[in-house]
Amino acid sequence: MITSTANKQVKYVSALLKKGKARREERLFVAEGVRMCLEIPPERIRTLYISDSFRGNPHYAELTEKVRQVEVLTDTVFAALSDTRTPQGVMAVVEQREYRLEEMAAAGSTGRPPLLMVLEQLQDPGNLGTILRAGEGAGATGILMDSGTADIYNPKVVRSTMGSLLRVPFVYVEDLDEALVFLKKAGIRLCATYLRGSRDYDKEDYRKATAFLIGNEGSGLSQETVARADVRIRIPMLGKVESLNAAVAASVVMYEAARQRRG
């Protein structure tokens, strides 16, 4: 049993929780909570960490029987390591999954036309997590992000996706403009959410291959990215509201696409 926060493994997991650089270098991330850990394929779990008291949990056997390595921490050490205020007593160090841009541009296993979210310089982990979770609900087939977007393996993102992180394909690209050109050549229509857009979002047809472009929370999309779009769409506003939160705007347009594709 691990009894000290000075333990080498505890320090290692702490670095993965707090430092994006450590996650990128190790190709690992940390997931907390019973529900999340149950959804992770056992072969992707490098190590499962549980609190001493968790051994009495009904899910203990289910979580530990197929995992390669299980470490027990005292409740005090687990609480100090946890990224949540009310730890559930279980966390996993998980191998990251890699996807390719080509996969994003192809129809999914269901044969549906691609429905992508393209995120540029999105900074808030909460917004990223919400877009990923809402995207799964709306039938998004993938998330494309530039290198300036928040780390999808940030603990806040992992927690807020409620498991969608494990099911929705995503990819980071160094050159967003090059990626947009690739999507256009693949027959995917680029729709930029833009305050000065020329078309109301619900007047466009999203039943064919579509990618929605969502920009930074404060400054929106860059002019270079807007210029690549096939259409600039806006969400009409009443009252004195000028714009919506990025995650809310993304959800609005994604669910309009979902509505059209059900019809």
Image (spheres, rainbow, N blue to C red):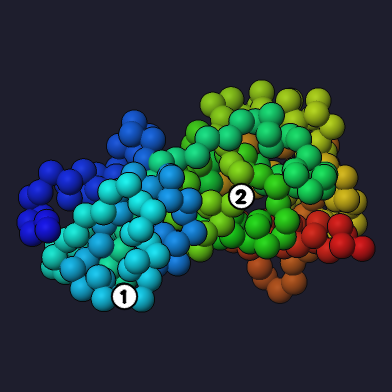
Label 2 SS:
loop
Q: Which residue is drawn at 18% across and 68% down?
A: 52
Q: Badge 2, how many Cα within 10 Å: few under 14, some, many 20+?
A: some
Image position, residue 247 (x, y; %) = 60, 58
Q: How many marks?
A: 2
Counting residues from the N terminus, which is met first, the one under dot 1 or under dot 2?
1
Q: In which quarter of the image is residue 79?
A: bottom left
Q: Is residue 37 above or below residue 224?
A: below
User: Which quarter of the image is occupied by the C terminus?
Assistant: bottom right
Q: Can residue 234 be seen in this view?
A: yes
Image position, residue 142 (x, y; %) = 66, 45
The mark closer to the camera, 1 or 2, is: 1
Q: Can residue 21 be seen in this view?
A: no
Q: Which amino acid does label 2 sit on?
A: Val
Q: Nearer the viewer, residue 193 or 43?
A: 43
Q: Is residue 180 above or below residue 194?
A: above
Which of the numbered marks, if any, corresponds to residue 57? 1
Q: In this view, does 57 lie above or below 224?
A: below
Q: Nearer the viewer, residue 4 or 133?
A: 4
Q: Check disc 2 and report the residue beneath it.
A: 168
